[in-house]
Image (cartoon, rainbow, N blue to C red):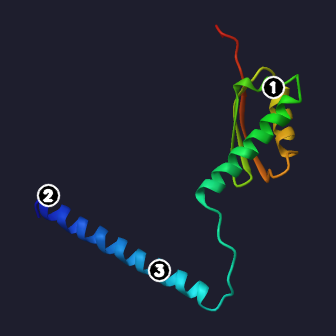
Amino acid sequence: MNKKGFLRIAATATVAALLASGSVAVWAQGSETAGASAAPAASTAKEVRQANRALSRKVYAALAKHKEIDAGNISVVARDGAVTLNGTVTDAAQIDSVAAIAKTVPGVKSVANRLSVQRPMGE
């Protein structure tokens, strides 16, 4: 079998798989709403992004209240209540402190702490 024949078969299989998965998704949606009462509409993607940004800002604000922590090298990413902390701090003790502060913010469900200690230049 030459390369063109193989690519044609692979493309056909891919299209068939996509069509089959689309059919299942349409069927599944129809079965969910057939007997159920009207449920509230799901949040739009824009509303979800706004909520995630608002939660990130709340975590930054909570960190700003603690003058001993330099949050300038910390990034906060929030997704549906799960907060990820990235970046560096100046002291190893601050790693746990930042995570503890983030956990106290209303709306935070979990914290993934990926902070590390900033090494002085030349080491």
Looking at the image, the residue that sits furthest to the bottom is 35
Q: Which residue is painted at 53% across and 85% down in the image?
A: 30
Q: Which residue is painted at 42% across and 75% down in the image?
A: 21
Q: In this view, does 22 lie above or below 114?
A: below
Percent coordinates x, y for residue 58 in the rendering: 80, 41
> Helix, strand or loop at disc 3?
helix
Q: Which mark is residue 26?
A: 3
Q: Which of marks 2 and 3 is nearer the N terminus?
A: 2
Q: Mark 1 Cα within 10 Å, few/some/many (few <14, many 20+)?
A: few
Do tag 1 and tag 3 residues touch (Cβ < 8 Å)?
A: no
| Between 51 and 86, the one nearer to me in the picture | 51
Q: Which residue is painted at 85% across and 27% down in the image?
A: 93
Q: Which residue is painted at 70% across and 25% down in the image?
A: 73
Q: In this view, does 17 lie above or below 55?
A: below
Percent coordinates x, y for residue 63 in the rendering: 83, 32
Q: How far apart are marks 1 and 2 (CA)?
A: 56 Å
Percent coordinates x, y for residue 47 in the rendering: 65, 56
Residue 66 seen in the figure? yes
| Between 114 and 44, the one nearer to me in the picture | 44
Q: Would residue 47 appear left or right of 27 to someone viewing this image?
A: right
Percent coordinates x, y for residue 6 in the rendering: 18, 63
Q: Earlier in the sequence, mark 1 or mark 2?
A: 2
> Helix, strand or loop at disc 1?
helix
Q: In this view, does 6 lie above or below 78?
A: below
| Between 74 and 1, the one nearer to me in the picture | 74
Residue underneath mark 2:
3
Residue underneath mark 1:
92
Q: Would residue 75 appear left or right of 110 to someone viewing this image?
A: left
